[in-house]
Amino acid sequence: MRKIVIAGNWKMYKTQADAVAFLQGFMPHLNDIADDREVVLCVPFTALVGMSQSLHGSLIRLGAQNVHWETAGAYTGEVAAPMLTELGVRYVIVGHSERRQYFGETDETVNLRLKAAQTAGLTPILCVGETKQQRDTGETESVIFSQLENALNGIDQTNLVVAYEPIWAIGTGDTCESAEANRVVGLMRAQLTNPDVPIQYGGSVKPDNVDEIMQQPEIDGALVGGASLQPNSFARIVNFSARR
Ligand code: 13P
């Protein structure tokens, strides 16, 4: 059975003090979380140390938002996998559209980062998704298939999560209709060599739409931006009504 993974992506939000305050509000909700689901918080690098200490012994997994492909070197501003694993980080987001759009991330660097993450024992969350213009011109499938093929070249599909994040749905409140997200995720799964890879949906997931999204048979989780920043809303999301 495919694992359910609900991950918060805090992006460039929250100081370490803010992160600890979040946990104080969020932790009391955790007793209610069904044990069939993995909950991950992908926090800024600067919050990892504090979160690592605060989450020790809890069910929440710690995630980072990027990783470099070398284990060390002259790469100013980058962070290497051993720096993450030392802190107990389990997951890392790779190839988020904001990295691709604003920081020159390419399919090739995404592929290198995926390999480095897996080599270090991290589970990468590979993000793919089309722009509004690509969707409007009927290129959704070809764009996503090409992103998957290039990113996954030579990648072990046993320690991997994939996220379908249509760019036009990110931070806009314009959620992809759940049946359409389900359709695209099903097509993505058919491109994978391992059909058990969990595939998340991301893009304006909120407390009031998470149940419908998670009731879709192909969707195995959510990658949540804005709604993961508030303890109550993220708690509602991780406690979505189960379909299975
Ligand atoms: P929002 O949930 O804010 O739309 O962000 C989605 C996202 O980019 C998660 O990685």
Image: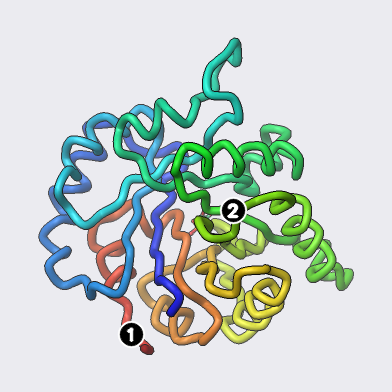
Residue for badge 1: 242
Check the image and tell me how it is coloured: rainbow
At x 51%, y 86%, the residue is 216
The residue mark sitting in front, 1 or 2, is 2
- Label 2 neighbourhood size at 10 Å, few (<14), some (14-19), many (20+)? many
Please indicate whether residue 230 sits to the left or right of residue 119 in the image.
Answer: left
Quadrant of the image occupied by residue 121? top left
The numbered disc on residue 126 is 2
Give the x, y percent position of residue 118: 52, 44
Q: Where is residue 120 drawn, in percent x and y?
A: 47, 37
* Mark 1–mark 2 distance (CA, rounded to whole Å): 24 Å
- For the image, the number of numbered tags is 2
Q: Give whichever of 131, 172 is nearer the camera.
A: 131
Ligand 1 within 8 Å of disc 2? The answer is: no
- Name the side, left or right, on which 158 lies relative to 21: right
Amino acid at circle 1: Ala
Pick out the residue farthest to the right: 137
Q: Nearer the viewer, residue 186 or 192?
A: 192
The spot of residue 100 in percent (x, y) is 69, 42
The kind of secondary structure element at disc 1 is loop
Q: Which mark is residue 20?
A: none
User: Local crowd at mark 1 within 10 Å, few (<14), some, or many (≥20)?
Assistant: few
Residue 3 in the image: above or below residue 123: below
Q: Is residue 210 above or below residue 131?
A: below
Looking at the rendered image, the quarter that the N terminus falls into is bottom left
Q: In the picture, residue 31 is in which quadrant?
A: bottom left
Type of amino acid under label 2: Leu
- Image point (71%, 42%), residue name: 101
